[in-house]
Amino acid sequence: MKPDNSSLQEHEPATHLLATAISHHQAGQFAEAERLYRVLLQKDPAHPDANHNLGILAGQVGHAEGGLPFLRNAVTTSPDREHYALSYSNALLTLGKSEDALHFLESAIDRGLNTAALRCNLGNAARALGQFDRAKNNFQAALALEPGHALAHYNLATILQDTGDFEGAVAGFRHALMQNPAFAEAHNNLGICLQALQRPDDAIASFRDALKANDNDADAHFNLGNALDLAGQSESALASYHKAFALDPTHVEALNRIGLIALKLGRLDESERSLRQALALKPQVADAHNNLGNTLHALQRREEAIASYHGAIALRPDYPEALSNLGNIYFEQGDFHAAEQSCRQALAINPDLLQAHLNLANALQALGAWDEAVAHYRVVLQQHPDFADAHYNLGNVLQKLERLDEAEASYRQALEFKPHFAYAHNNLGNVLRQLGRLNEAAQSYHHAIQLQPDYAEAHNNLGIALQSFNLIEAEAHCRRALELNPRLTEAMVFLADILSNRGEFVDAEAWLHRAMQINPAMSDAWAGIPTLRKMTESDHQWIARAQELIKLPLPARSMAYLRHAMGKYHDDIRQYELAFINHQTANDASKQYAPRYDRRQAEHLADLVMAGFSKEFVDGPHSGANASTRPVFVVGMPRSGTSLAEQIIAAHPAAFGAGELFFWEPALHGFDLHGANVESQLAALAGNFLSLLDKCSPEAQRVVDKMPTNFRCLGLIRAAFPHAKIIHMERNPVDTCLSIYFQHFDAAHPYANDLDNLAHQFRQYRRIMAHWRDVLPVQTLLHVPYEGLVENQEHWTRIMLEFVDLPWDARCLDFHLKERTVGTASKWQVRQKMNRTSVERWRNYQQFVGPLLGLLD
């Protein structure tokens, strides 16, 4: 019969039996080792080594709770053995019984087992209970007992890491590594601290050292991926996350990061796949839901993205990033109120979330809450002053608020940090154009088009900027814009303006209606219609829509356009009180952005003109003067009939109407009356102006410059062109000022939006013209009464033609049939037959124009 080994082993000496059990234990033969330990305990239930080793073995096979009684027996029977106390306290800590561990270790130390290892465990127990000072004291006590104790250095460093002392933690982990260079956990935590200290290269090196010590550590691969990502090494980061997941297929955070990096790299399918895999493993990870929403958003699957954001918020209602992202997608869908609400919820949770401030600012901008939008953009820029997109968006809002100097500064800041930002170049051009700096504006639009040749809006805006210099090129850019974007309503409005300047009013109105069909809220298109014809009561639908549009959050400039248009409608149908109220509202709106009229400056300028250009200077003679008779000047206050006079002369086959040439006012401001080179200045001015006239019309005998405000420049004009003819249009002062008040003049005439300022400016004009009556010879200056021209068209037409040395031509009586471009507010009127509707018009508004009535004296 075969002997029963188990029976034989029961009779072996305890020492031999223990040695055999330990041998099996060390060889990984846990079942046989456990059986032999239990045989020993049957013989001697208090056997300390059998109890201790059986407790250790239980922990190794995943039954730590079951091994705890054996470890307790060991320390009870041999309380003076350090390794028994160490094993028992380790088991308590592993099982989360930190308070039990703390009491046991304190008792052991009191009994004399005051060793570095036990002090370390006592520190870990205190740390687990949140008693960081107590933990720190015990780790320091361990190092006092054993200065080279690597684990004590490591544990003390982790306390410093937990409390935010990353510099101290770095020193502690380095001390641990001096004692144990292969201490993988110390390398890993050192990397985490270096990363927190914004030392990405050092962090990467530490994580790589951790992996040299233990390449199978999934967390170290994951942490390396984080560091590589922060260092901008996205591909390498992705590889590290994949390695972490390969080592630990339950590593949900690695999958989440794979999804994030893949999204950043534009690998949207990979991103979606990884994030869905993460959620399949752990559906309650709110971050993965949020990140999946970002990926779906990038895939233009907005409804699915919204569902993912809601999934994240359902798991974590106080998740500000998900709320902000949800607000952003609502914004893109045009639900601005929902976007605002979601972003405000995000900021209520985290007031420092910059993306939420940015998204809220975008929503507020769309809702017309521009002042508040500015505040939120500035919050973003305080933290990120180099954020070009935030500067750009801030510029957009400031432009709507008509704070043009600030808007210009914001666009320039955006371009400082992002020089190839085509949209910022375009919008900077818009601001410069509104400021009257057309050459600079054109340069900005050219920059935008160079960067983005198919940028339709920039082509259209360039056309608008060029309108005063080159109508052919201006129209070409407008039509190019419509080729690139057939639904670009701004280009439709500009094309309507071009067509109306040529007298093609029906086609112009058709383009305005087309713009409104595409964008029913485009008030500028609707406001253009009354400028093209006389309105009638049958246009009741027009006024009804206009009244709806003024309820929208329109920029002040658009509000002014629309209110002036409404004023014209009511004037055309003889509802004079409503007409004045609307024009007054328009002018009040324009005061939000128009430059302020400076009365002292206006008086000073008049004084300078009259003092500088005396009769002696004007008569000369001047060697720099030019004998040309081509230039003809029509001057006066705006809306005094200058366009009508130009149109009459331009109807002559030997004449050309050049419109309002922006030449003499800048020349006047730059002219040095007291310098030694007065004659060379005059010669240069005359030559440059004749070159300008040649560009307008190389063949015409007479070219008319009808810039009204040239009335300030007549002394300089006479000195440069002693044979040029000047026609001064005079109109009833109240009719003139009222007509100015009823027009939108933007920045060109800062006095135009206030009746008192209008009266003041008219008096300065009168002073200057009275001076020229005394200074200029009668053969140079002809005064034409607007009312006289209206009453006796042929008589005054003959006088004007004779004055400019042109023979009589009956076609000048049919001036309204002349096909030419007229770019002023009178473009419709000058194409109508002569009529008296504008004479004594002010009497319809007598009750409103008190500040102007004094001009009748």
Image: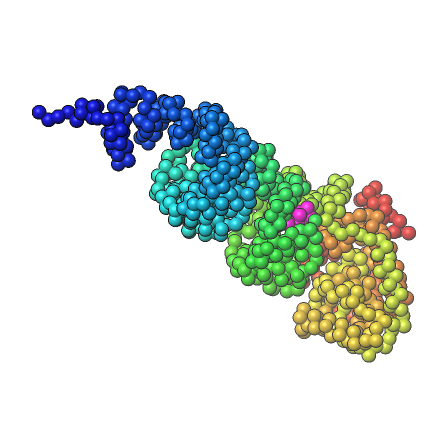
Q: In the image, residue 49 lies at what x, y percent?
A: 33, 28
Q: Residue furthest left?
A: 1
Is 397 magenta? The answer is yes
Is 376 magenta? The answer is no
Could you tell me which residue is drawn at 34 percent across and 30 percent down?
Answer: 56
Q: In the image, residue 494 lies at what x, y percent?
A: 61, 54
Q: Name the one closer to the observer, 588 or 834.
A: 588
Could you tell me which residue is drawn at 44 percent across and 37 percent down?
Answer: 288
Q: Determine whether 558 is above or below 348 in the image.
A: below
Q: Determine whether 205 is above or below 721 in the image.
A: above
Q: Quadrant of the N terminus?
A: top left
Q: Is residue 79 visible?
A: yes
Question: Which of the 4 image quadrants contains residue 470?
Answer: bottom right
Could you tell me which residue is drawn at 45 percent across and 30 percent down?
Answer: 113
Q: Tell me if 258 is positioned left or right of 371 in this view.
A: left
Q: Tell me if 586 is positioned left or right of 302 in this view.
A: right
Q: Tell me if 447 is positioned left or right of 310 in this view.
A: right
Point out the stretch of residues depicted in magenta.
395-402
Q: In the image, residue 775 lies at what x, y percent?
A: 89, 68
Q: Is residue 339 visible?
A: no
Question: Which of the 4 image quadrants contains residue 580?
Answer: top right
Q: Name the one closer to the observer, 15 or 603.
A: 15
Q: In the image, residue 389 lies at what x, y percent?
A: 58, 50
Main SS category, magenta section: helix
Could you tell me which residue is drawn at 51 percent across and 33 percent down?
Answer: 138
Question: Which of the 4 image quadrants contains residue 772?
Answer: bottom right
